[in-house]
Image (cartoon, rainbow, N blue to C red):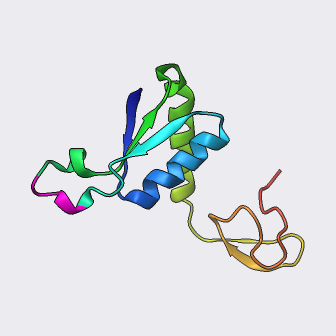
Amino acid sequence: MERFYNAFNRFDAYLLLHRLQQAGITAHVFNEHVQSIVGDVPPDVAQPQVWLERARDRPQAEAVLAALQADRRKTGSVRCRKCGEDNPATFDLCWHCGADLQVS
């Protein structure tokens, strides 16, 4: 196993974990309940961490992480082509009708 990512918080760690799992990468979250001891130990030790099961998955995992970070930088809104509703740019599906918001 190999440490891949120090998360900001538990939710951040699980968001990345689930994206990795969707890509077929086996990973685990460690230290998810240890943030309260930051100050007693260095932050990189107490923050939630995402570990890869197989080191050979690192290049693919880095691509998944880059895509996640790009998604986080999206701002503004996207108008649904089906119902015309405005949705945050970070949404994949329309919150109103469920239509795909991705531009093909």
The image quarter in which residue 74 lies: bottom right
Q: Considering only vertical position in the picture, is 50 above or below 52? A: below
Q: Nearer the viewer, residue 33 or 17?
A: 33
In the image, what residue occupies the spot 43% across and 45% down?
Answer: 29
Q: Considering only vertical position in the picture, is 44 above or below 102? A: above
Residue 86 drawn at (x, y percent):
73, 78
In the image, what residue occupies the spot 34% across and 50% down?
Answer: 48
Residue 59 drawn at (x, y percent):
52, 25
Looking at the image, residue 80 sits to the left or right of residue 60; the answer is right
Q: Nearer the viewer, residue 75 or 10?
A: 10
Looking at the image, residue 3 sits to the left or right of residue 79; the answer is left
Report the residue that reaches farthest toward the left.
40
In the image, what residue occupies the spot 85% across and 67% down?
Answer: 99
Residue 38 drawn at (x, y percent):
17, 57
Report the residue that reaches farthest toward the top.
56
Question: Does the segment drawn in magenta span residue 38?
Answer: yes
The image quarter in which residue 23 lies: top right
Looking at the image, residue 83 sits to the left or right of residue 69; the answer is right
Total marks in image: 0
Q: Considering only vertical position in the picture, is 68 above or below 53? A: below
The image quarter in which residue 36 lies: bottom left
Q: Considering only vertical position in the picture, is 31 above or below 37? A: above
Question: Does the segment drawn in magenta span residue 19?
Answer: no
Q: Which residues are magenta?
A: 36-40
| Predominant SS along the magenta part | loop
Residue 15 drawn at (x, y percent):
52, 54
In the image, what residue occupies the spot 46% across and 22% down?
Answer: 55
Q: Quadrant of the N terminus?
A: top left
